[in-house]
């Protein structure tokens, strides 16, 4: 789950810390959602953490702790799609189940010299069937991993090493000399600009954070209050986003700088405004986060909070 859309080198320290804190499915199922999200902070795509937590709860509380070991059973877990189900069933349980990730798709498309768009539903269906047809009767987990590794290390998107490939005899693209044109380049989705306003309310060495909605960007995480910038001024936004007790006691909001954060399909720009307030009791959806614990924030908001340490003229940051 962690490796979806995220590089292995980034995942390794998160994986180690996550397993140390939640060593089995019951430990994860019993954990508080906020703690799961805290352990995920910085890894991005927070929906995955929600799904993983929901799946652990499903296994622990509804399946008596018995992890499903078939594709059909795995598909019932939140966040588990056809690829994850096939990978878990074949690698963990040695079931005869196909997988089709980006690497495998490319290898198979080249094996049959397919000129179709790799994301066209009919083509995806055809490649799934092919992935199933070529499965051996035994050791499907090893076979699937070998196929993924072949795509990752030999049959790479650019400059595939056909001279080192064990499949040259079977490969139609190699025979026809059309390897470089397969798969057909996909059309990139346009990146959407998303202006946001973020409010940094500081009380000494703490900053005010609120829990974000269960859906949308940074779902369910605790961050400094941040909303879409739809043109209103920061004071009007603060009236909607902050508790009345804070509004009464805080100083005047002042612009503090801007931060850019690149997500896969969105370029977020935060206009950051700051004020100070006494560290008074706040409603349940808010709390005071010690600045020393800022690493528990999603990456974009760590950059936002870092503005507090910068002299005014430098307060413009890019993050990715
Ligand atoms: S021969 Fe070349 S194109 Fe065909 S599967 Fe091997 S590396 Fe990929």
Image (cartoon, rainbow, N blue to C red):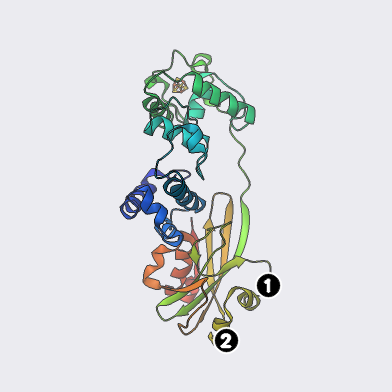
Mark positioned earlier in the residue sequence (2 or 1): 1
Instruction: Provide residue 161's location: percent of width, then percent of height.
Output: 41, 25
Instruction: Provide residue 9's location: percent of width, then percent of height.
Output: 36, 46
The reply, left or right, for residue 195 in relation to residue 172 is right
Instruction: Provide residue 120's location: percent of width, then percent of height.
Output: 63, 31
Q: Which residue lies furthest to the right in this view?
A: 231
Which quarter holds ligand 1? top left
The residue carrying pointer 2 sits among few (fewer than 14), some (14 to 19) or many (20 or more) residues within 10 Å by Cα, namely few
The relative height of residue 315 versus residue 139 in the rendered view (above or below) is below
Image-quadrant location for residue 255? bottom right
Q: How many marks?
A: 2
Q: Label 2: which residue?
A: 248
Residue drawn where x is 39% and y is 78% of the image: 205
The reply, left or right, for residue 201 in relation to residue 163 is right
Instruction: Provide residue 188's location: percent of width, then percent of height.
Output: 60, 41
Q: Is residue 182 visible?
A: no
Q: Which of 26 and 89 is in front in this view?
A: 26
The residue carrying pointer 1 sits among few (fewer than 14), some (14 to 19) or many (20 or more) residues within 10 Å by Cα, namely few
Q: Label 1: which residue?
A: 232
**Mark 2 vs mark 1: in front:** 2
Image-quadrant location for residue 194? bottom right
Q: What element carries label 2?
A: helix
Disc 1 within 8 angstroms of ligand 1 (CB): no
Q: Can residue 282 be seen in this view?
A: yes
Residue drawn where x is 60% and y is 76% of the image: 238
**Which mark identifies residue 172?**
none
The relative height of residue 153 versus residue 170 in the rendered view (above or below) is below
């Amino acid at each position: 789950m962690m490796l979806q859309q995220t590089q292995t080198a980034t995942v390794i320290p998160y994986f180690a810390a996550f397993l140390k804190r939640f060593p089995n499915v019951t430990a994860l199922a019993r954990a508080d959602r906020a703690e799961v999200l805290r352990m995920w902070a910085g890894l991005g795509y927070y929906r995955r953490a929600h799904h993983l937590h929901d799946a652990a709860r499903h296994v622990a509380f509804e399946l008596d702790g018995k992890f499903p070991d078939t594709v059909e059973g795995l598909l019932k877990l939140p966040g588990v799609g056809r690829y994850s189900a096939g990978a878990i069933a074949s690698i963990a349980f040695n079931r005869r189940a196909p997988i089709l990730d980006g690497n495998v798709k490319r290898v198979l498309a080249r094996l049959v010299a397919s000129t179709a768009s790799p994301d066209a539903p009919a083509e995806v269906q055809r490649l799934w069937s092919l992935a199933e047809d070529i499965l051996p009767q035994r050791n499907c987990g090893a076979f699937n991993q070998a196929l993924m590794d072949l795509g990752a290390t030999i049959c790479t998107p650019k400059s595939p090493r056909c001279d080192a490939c064990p499949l040259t005899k079977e490969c139609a693209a190699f025979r026809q000399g059309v390897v470089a044109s397969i798969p057909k380049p996909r059309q990139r989705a346009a990146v959407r600009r998303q202006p946001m306003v973020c409010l940094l309310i500081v009380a000494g060495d703490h900053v005010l954070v609120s829990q974000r909605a269960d859906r949308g960007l940074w779902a369910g995480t605790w961050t400094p209050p941040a909303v879409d910038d739809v043109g209103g001024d920061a004071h009007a936004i603060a009236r909607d986003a902050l508790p009345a007790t804070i509004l009464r006691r805080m100083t005047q909001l002042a612009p503090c700088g801007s931060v850019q954060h690149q997500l896969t399909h969105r370029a977020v720009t935060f206009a950051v405004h700051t004020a100070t307030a006494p560290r008074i009791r706040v409603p349940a959806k808010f709390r005071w986060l010690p600045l020393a614990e800022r690493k528990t924030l999603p990456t974009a908001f760590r950059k936002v909070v870092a503005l507090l340490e910068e002299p005014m003229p430098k307060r413009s940051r890019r993050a990715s």
